Amino acid sequence: MTPRLRPCLLLHYHEISLKAGHRPMFLRHLRQNLERATADLQPVGVVQFPGRLMLDLEGNPDPDRVRERVGRVFGIANLALAQRVPSGLDSIKSAVGRLVEGRQFESFRISARRAFKTYPLTSMELNRELGSFVLERVKTRVDLDDPALTIYVEVLPDETFIYFDREPGPGGLPVGSSGTVMSLLSGGIDSPVAAWRMMKRGCRVEFVHFHSVPYLGPTSQAKARALVERLTQWQYFSRLYLVPFGEIQREVVLSVPPPARVVVYRRLMVRIAEILARATGAPALVTGESLGQVASQTLPNLARIDEAADLPILRPLIGMDKQEITAQAQHLGTFEISIEPDQDCCTLFVPKHPATHVSADEILRAEERLNLDALVRQGSEGAVLETFEFPPGAGPYPSARRARAAEKESLSP
């Protein structure tokens, strides 16, 4: 009897496989992220096999859309739309014959792998058997180096997966497996890329955006919302804190010499972001700073900013140049949002010639003129929280209780 072809999406992971005793935790996060990413594309069932995951697509009306969604799930090394058949040799041959029927390809190779060593044929023997089978049915030739078509065959004890096209996944670690961070989000090109790179390392990212309403219009807030909405497609649930910063900047202008103002602004932002981070359980801050890119990002000024923080400040873009960051933003689809004209707090009350080397004594003298506690409290208490979810209507995920448990688990030794 001709075996039934059962469609599925086959997923391989790489870095997770190196995690030894912690692998179940990473796989649990990966599985729940896959379920969330496809929540509105049912029916999709997630099944775990040794070294791989499978999404059962029987009855699913749009497998290509499922594949597109899964292509944004961190932790996946590669993925392929495949067909499932029983693992007997006759069933595999029959399935390969049906899949190549009507295709024209001038060359091919078989790439067969056994997931268990008790299968009657070795991988090399499978390659020869299936290669000869194809040559009997298609006018083509074998090319092991540069084939026009590669036929992948993965044999498991009960089922075999057969597919032609394999595409790379985003790699990294599943979102949620490395805890939570608070990202300072401007309307520029850099900070969304920095947040995305932390997601790729398994972090769930909270966002804080500083705006200068009423001194400037609300355009920077609209841009921040658009950026968070785009990035939420990679982590499924996001929170954005909108902090009014214009009055705080005005107080700085009245008291702080112009060359030191930008660094003082940044130190105040860090202090406010820390309060919000602690309230959400985030043990670190993230910025989009790149060494030497602007006056506040010189090594001495970065040191001054760090001195204002109790939590660690992570800077995933610190060694990247603007071209590299821009290319990454274009790939993510955040670049077009970031370059839209707006008015943000970085353009308000900024001196023409900010200092590139502010000493610790200069900063302390400048901040002595300010009521720092009051300004930080003003910013943190004035923050407005907005939430974002993907797919739309799916609700918070994971729940606060599960998120706290995941953070505790991922940060434990």
Image (cartoon, grey):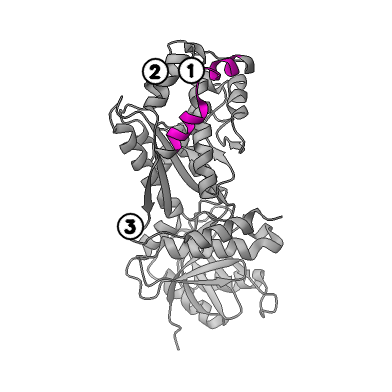
- Disc assigned to residue 392: 3
- The kind of secondary structure element at disc 1 is helix
The residue under label 2 is which amino acid type?
A: Phe
Residue located farthest toward the bottom when viewing the structure as drawn: 1
The crowding category of the residue bearing disc 1, from other C-alpha atoms within 10 Å (few below 14, some 14 to 19, many at least 20), is: many
Residue drawn at x 48%, y 73% as measured from the top left: 96
Residue tagged 2 = 349
| Residue at the spot 42% in from the left edge and 54% down from the top edge | 237
Q: Between marks 3 and 1, how big is the CA–CA gap? A: 41 Å
Magenta stretch: give its range. 362-380
Vertical side of 148 occupied by 83: above or below:
below
Find residue 129 and report its horizontal and vertical position in percent: 59, 74
Residue 370 rendering spot, x and y as whole percentages: 50, 21
Queried whether the magenta region covers residue 371, the answer comes back as yes
Whole-number angstrom distance, CA of label 3 to CA of label 2: 38 Å
Q: Which of pointers 3 and 2 lies earlier in the amino acid sequence?
A: 2
